[in-house]
């Protein structure tokens, strides 16, 4: 039976704190704590890679693409339904379409996008929880296929595009 420690013994040992827990019975060390983000919060789980679409069996979606030379449209340009900008291109495509594929399709209809040094900047236009349209930049590509960027291989599914959203393309 364990005897009660005197006050002097408790102060010498470190107070009335309980003894440290015994080591784990399995003998394996504890897993490391989850990594922290730059803000000190737990890092989000890695994004799941999207599944490619079987384009023979899957119906394409209608993608409304709005182009503008020199910059993106503002969210006010999309504020009234039915009063969207006039420079629209409608493309039937799939969720696994990459920004490179979309660049090539925009080049077919926009002479400014065919320039060798043209840079295309993509933004998703979507309604926020209050119904106001938001414009969020998601990637850039070059018109010239020899100048590759990391964004060339981003698919619509990877940029969190949802059916019904618009794509805004700035040609610079």
Image: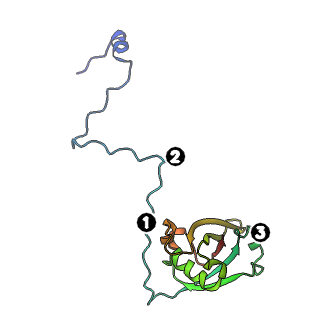
Residue 141's image quarter? Answer: bottom right
Q: Quadrant of residue 64?
A: bottom right
Which mark is on residue 38? 2
Task: Farthest residue to the front: give it.
Answer: 116
29 to 49, vertically: above or below: above
Q: Residue at x 64, y 73 (%)?
A: 169
Mark closer to the observer (1, 3): 3
Q: Which mark is residue 48?
A: 1
In which quarter of the view is residue 33 placed? top left
Q: Residue at x 72, y 70 (%)?
A: 73
Instruction: Identify the residue at horizontal 62%, vertical 77% (top origin).
Output: 115
Q: Quadrant of the N terminus?
A: top left
Element type at marker 3? helix
**Residue in front for this viewpoint, 114 or 76:** 114
Up the image or down, 39 lies above or below 86; here it is: above
Q: Position of residue 75 (x, y in %)?
A: 73, 68
**Residue 51 image point, x, y percent:** 42, 75
Task: Count residues near mark 2 (Cα–Cα under 10 Å), then give few for <14, some for 14-19, many for 20+.
Answer: few
Write down the residue under mark 3. Answer: 76
Left or right, residue 51 beside residue 83: left
* Secondary element type, mark 1: loop
Q: Earlier in the sequence, mark 2 or mark 1?
A: 2
Tell me which numbered mark, 2 or 3, is placed earlier along the sequence.
Answer: 2
Q: Estimate the spatial distance between the alpha carbons at disc 2 and disc 3, rounded to whole Å.
A: 33 Å
Say which of 71 and 77 sits in front. 71
Q: Which mark is residue 103?
A: none
Kindly report the distance in space between the C-alpha atoms of the residues bearing marks 2 and 1: 21 Å
As measured in the structure, the alpha-carbon distance from the residue carrying label 1 to the one carrying label 3 is 33 Å
């Amino acid at each position: 039976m364990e005897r009660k420690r005197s006050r002097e013994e408790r102060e010498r040992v470190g107070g009335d704190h309980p003894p440290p827990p015994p080591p784990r019975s399995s003998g394996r060390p504890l897993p490391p704590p989850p990594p922290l983000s730059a803000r000190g919060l737990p890092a989000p789980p890695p994004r799941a890679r999207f599944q490619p679409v079987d384009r023979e069996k899957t119906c394409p979606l209608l993608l409304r693409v709005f182009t503008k030379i020199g910059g993106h449209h503002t969210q006010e340009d999309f504020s009234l339904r039915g009063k969207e900008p006039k420079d629209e291109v409608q493309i039937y495509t799939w969720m696994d379409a990459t920004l490179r594929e979309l660049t090539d399709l925009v080049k077919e209809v926009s002479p400014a996008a065919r320039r060798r040094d043209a840079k295309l900047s993509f933004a998703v236009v979507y309604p926020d929880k209050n119904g106001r349209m938001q414009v969020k930049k998601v990637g850039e590509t070059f018109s010239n296929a020899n100048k590759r960027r990391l964004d060339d291989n981003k698919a619509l599914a990877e940029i969190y595009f949802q059916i019904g959203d618009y794509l805004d393309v700035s040609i610079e």
